[in-house]
Amino acid sequence: MQRIGVFVCWCGSNIAATVDVAAVAEAAKLEPAVAFATDYQYMCSESGQSMIKDAVKEHNLTGIVIASCSPRMHETTFRKTAQAAGLNPYMVEIANLREQCSWVHKNKEEATEKAIVLMRTAVAKLTLNQPLIAGESSVTKRALVIGGGIAGIQTALDIADAGYEVDIVEKKPTIGGKMAQLDKTFPTLDCAACILTPKMVDVATNDKITIYSYSEVEEVKGFVGNFTAKIRRKARYVDEELCTGCGACTEKCPSKKNPNEFNMGLDNRTAIYIPFAQAVPKVPVIDAKNCIKFKTGKCGLCATVCPSNAIKYDQEDTFVEENYGAIVVATGFNPIKLDEFGELGYGQIPDVITSLEYERLMNAAGPTKGHVLRPSDGKKPKKIVFVQCVGSRGQSCREKGYCSKICCMYTAKHAILTKDHYPEMDVDVFYIDVRTPGKNYDEFYRRAVEEYDVNYIKGQVGKIYEENGKVMVQGSDMLGNKQLTVEADLVVLATAIEPDETARSIGTMLTASMDTNDFFTEAHAKLRPVESPTAGIYLSGVCQGPKDVPETVSQAGAAASKVIGLLAKDKLVGNPCVAGSNPLLCNGCGQCANVCPYGAISYVEEEVRGPGVREVRRYAVVNEAVCQGCGACTVTCPSGAMDLKGFTNRQIMAEVDAICK
């Protein structure tokens, strides 16, 4: 006979302001299996937990229902409390009165009625609960970092410094990411390369770190502590072991008119190229689409001049399979494409460029050697107009609803650097409002206005067009309450940023949660900001949401600390809420195995003999060490043979019956 205790939490005023918690506790006492019920202001507090432990012993409780906040918050807390009181930790049910009731209702009578129903469902389920025992699994002492930007680099270095091996997989020919393309960083105006390059070298020379550049993760299987990843190493057509990075091949290559991706297409590169001077690894890659040798079978000049015979035209993609205990996603971001913003003239007017393109123009290693020149005629502009929030904070389907966070600051940086190099140049900035949330950020913005006399115009730009050789910027001046048209020689658009195009496919591969904007979703915004809801998957950098370099590095370190904490363990306690198959009901159809994202289901064949009967029966078997208890197999099974421990069909139906009571 079950003896259940119900503990209703006020959650301060989060629940008590909308729900009559005393009435919920009184209603609980009327439930047949409930032996004790009470309410308290903070059940998760030390005194609240002590109350639960005392009640378990005093009333000989066999299970407890905590009517409080989301189980995402404190389910682990109350399971530990139950265990300390001598109960099985899986004889605990959480009735979510905060997120599912008090926070979504204003009428106290309705909220209280619903809270009572939620409490009843938890009690009904708990009456059918069985004690569960968690299994254990080993931990592979190696981490995988997907993405080689500053986030991935910092995460890998921190994990390696703790003594664990790390593999970085970067889809481009070199690590470095977007930060390698920057000139200076705000608010200190430090040289981006001066900060980044030493870290890239540290990664290359660290014997605990392996770099898989020009590579992609093709497949991931397994579970926390025991992942297996298949990595495709794309053919560079250059042997990394033999190449010395001398650059002779790039100098002699006759195919020289290929858009340079690193310089945002503002100049050209050869068909065999090293993306930038400080690239790691400093090994060229052949662009097979534009290489004369691959297109016509002729040329081969790069192989002729290579002193180390590193050019391998017959090289093919190879695959590496490795085991990992943890995976860190650091896939970064890209500026949005401006194809749908025709009114701004990008792609039609040569002197309308993006902020990242302007960054390359200002860089001493860029296409113009650091001189700001108009793309149309190579002349120095006299007036530059910066346009903020292009594609950010909008309401239409073509715009991002979120703030990209870095645009206000990098535009202020561009304005300061422009005026510093060219004091005579006029600089206007159209903005919606200026957001400067970081340390010394507001002072940096005010410096642009007060010290460098940058003209900030509060208003949005509606149209950019050409007239008499000038770029005309038509917008509003909200403070002056007027429409205005500004003549400019160069217009710079501060484009929104979005997750890298690989984010969605990688998220699907890792069974990680993502939001509607394709940013990875953290397990808890406040308490677990660098963890994915999928155990063993961690988030680093802009893949989780817009952020600047300091915030990215901070999150990278936080993700690394979580990985180190995981890899430091020899054994992991598994989730006992796993699927199980009833061989007597299973017809071996295979549907459950098809939907299982973890590959936990296999089939066995068993010969059945009886009087005059001899047949082979096929049924499903679940590997409990691999199963993560997602329940996909349970809802798919047509014969009802699959069930989920802790969430059986009987338990779920008992909850439904309690709602209809």
Image: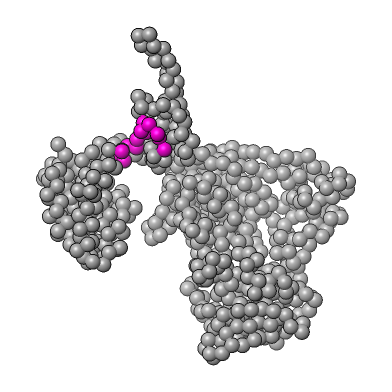
Camera-side residue of 441 and 102: 102
Q: Which one is nearer the viewer's eye here, 294 or 55?
A: 294
**Residue 15 shows in the view:** yes
Residue depicted at x 52% and y 47%: 508
Res 137 seen here: no
Magenta span dominant secondary structure: loop
- Which quadrant holds the N terminus? top left
* Number of numbered tags placed on the structure image: 0
Residue extending furthest toward the top: 612
- Measured as percent of width and height from the top left, residue 56 is found at 16, 45
Relative height, residue 428 to residue 525 (above, below) = below
- Residue beneath the point at 12% across and 49% down: 30
Magenta stretch holds residue 644: yes
From the top left corner, tell me how far across and down residue 340 is, in percent. Answer: 63, 67
Q: Is residue 195 left or right of residue 562?
A: right
> How far from the left and from the top, in percent, is residue 346?
68, 71
Please provide the residue range marked out in magenta.
636-649
Q: Magenta segment: does it hold 241?
A: no
Question: Residue at 41% across / 54% down in the picture?
Answer: 523
The quarter holding residue 269 reads bottom right
Q: Looking at the picture, how far across and down is residue 22, in whole percent? A: 14, 59
Q: Is residue 228 left or right of residue 127?
A: right
Classify residue 87 by image quadrant.
Answer: top left
The one nearer the camera, 370 or 110, is 110
